[in-house]
Structures are given as structure tokens and as C-alpha cells.
Amino acid sequence: MRLFAVFGNPVAHSLSPLIHNAAFTAFDQKDAIYTRVLLDRGETLRVVFERCGLSGANITVPFKEFAFDQADEVRGIAKEIGAVNTWVVENGKIIGYNSDAPGFMEALGYTPKKVLILGAGGTARALSHALIKSGADIFVLNRSEAKLAYFLREKIACSTKSPETDFDLIVNTTPAGLKDDFLPLNETMLKSYFSNAEMAFDVIYGRETPFLALARECHLKTRDGLEMLISQAAISFRLFSPTVQDGEISSVMRTALRLPKEIIWS
């Protein structure tokens, strides 16, 4: 039996078990099952992974940088980003990948010109990389200066102070609104940015966050992280099951989301 999991904190809300198990069933991967692991400390990620005997995993907030550091080898764009959201065991080694960047651009569906990214964790790194590759100008805003070291090193515009400029896309990558009713930025400043923006994107899915509610109040187009979840999950699934060549993985996962939420293998 091949066992896979998603690591995070919180992780009880994750729909990854639902969509991955649906794909395993649809593509006759009878030897595979996917579950969730609530992790307390990122330092223990690899230890827990190995004790569980996992063949692969997805890693979400706030452990993507730990996943980068603890992998035996990192491949693809994850090397540039410095954050990993997928682990796969190959020949006894843990190989790290990042599917957030392509997943985000596919879910976004268009190329923005100027983007404000709220937060500076592993997800923000991946999204900034994808957006810069697409030709967008970005600015990363974060409350603490320590997390901005990566962006300063990469010469990406960033600060702990709100920039006095307009953006057509505002992206929340912080956990604000995931298990609370907080905004990622004070309401007055957010409304100021929303007044001249076209879209607000929150990587959180499964609920209308205060960030998206305020954006709708300001008459913006809004998008949550559900399509991003599906896009990046389909990429991860191909890494978990490389013999599957069918191009309908995303469709299978999307259909699975219409099942009762109680049907989540956990």
C-alpha cells in the first residue's frame, strides 16, 4: 500500500484527501490512499513523514520552507523559490517540488500588470515567481521584516510599509481568515487598494474570508484558492502516480468536490 498525506497547521479543513483519493479510484490506483497530518512543528516534518512510511506528501501552510530545507533533492522551480509543497520518495530519497506557481497562474486565468502580494511565506514566494515570469510588476507587503529577506535577496520590491501606489490585483497569501475573522491588512488601507483594483485573490478556500467579503463590498471580481488547489493537486498527482497519463485528472478532482464533504478519507 502506498500512503500519501497533506501536512499543515491547521489541516482539518483540507480537501486534498477528497480529491486525491477520488483520482486514485478513477485511475485504478488501488494500492494508494491519501490522508491528513496535523503537524505542530516544522522541524519534525521529515521525522513524521518517515515514521508514517509515506510515499509522498503535499505540504501546506506554514511548512513549505521546512519542506525545502529537509528534502534530499529539490527540482524545478522550487530551487528558485526556496519553498516546496510536494514531496515524492524516489529510490529512497525525498525529492521536493513546487506546484503552487503553475497552479496559481492556471487558476488566475489572466496576466495582471501590477500585483500586491500580502504575506511573505512559501506561497508568496511561489506566486511572486510565477507573476514575475508572466511579466507582472509585483510588490510584497509583510508585517515582519525577517520574512522579507528572500525577496530582498531576489531584488523583488517589498516592505513592511504599505506602498502608495495602485494595483490591479491584490493577493492574500497570509492565513488571516483561515480559522479566524481577521483581515490581512487594516480595513482602511485595504479599501484604498480595492478602490482602484480589478480583482482580489485569496489562496484560502472553503469559506468566504473577510478579505474576499470586503473585496466584494468594494465591487471587485474575487477568486478563492479552490481552482488553485485543483490545478496544483493535479500536478502533484502526476508526481505521485507517474504511470497515469490521462489528461482528465483536474476534471476528476473537480467532480469529486461535488460529493458530500463527509466523504473525505482522513
Image (cartoon, rainbow, N blue to C red):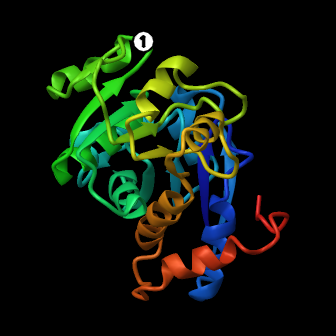
From what the image shows, is residue 95 above or below residue 264?
above
Name above or below for residue 102 compared with residue 7: below
Q: Residue at x 50, y 64 (%)?
A: 233
Where residue 203 sits: x, y (%)? 51, 45
**x and y, in percent, of residue 122 in the image:** 40, 36
Q: Look at 77% across and 74% down and name the residue there.
A: 259
Q: Is residue 1 visible?
A: no
For the C terminus, which image quadrant? bottom right
Residue 34 against residue 61 in the figure, above or below: below
Q: Report the label total.
A: 1
Residue type highlighted by circle 1: Ser
At 48% across and 36% down in the image, what residue appears?
Answer: 172
Question: Residue 31 or 9: which is nearer the viewer?
Answer: 9
| Residue 178 appears in the picture as rendered | yes
Residue 10 occupies quadrant: top right
Q: Residues within 10 Å of mark 1 (few under 14, many from 20)?
A: few
| Residue 152 pos. (x, y %) | 20, 20
Quadrant location of residue 26? bottom right
Q: Is residue 230 left or right of residue 163?
A: right
Front position in the image: 254 or 245: 254
Q: Which residue is mark 1?
A: 144
- Residue at 62% x, 50% y is 205
Residue 191 image offset from top left, x and y in percent:
50, 27
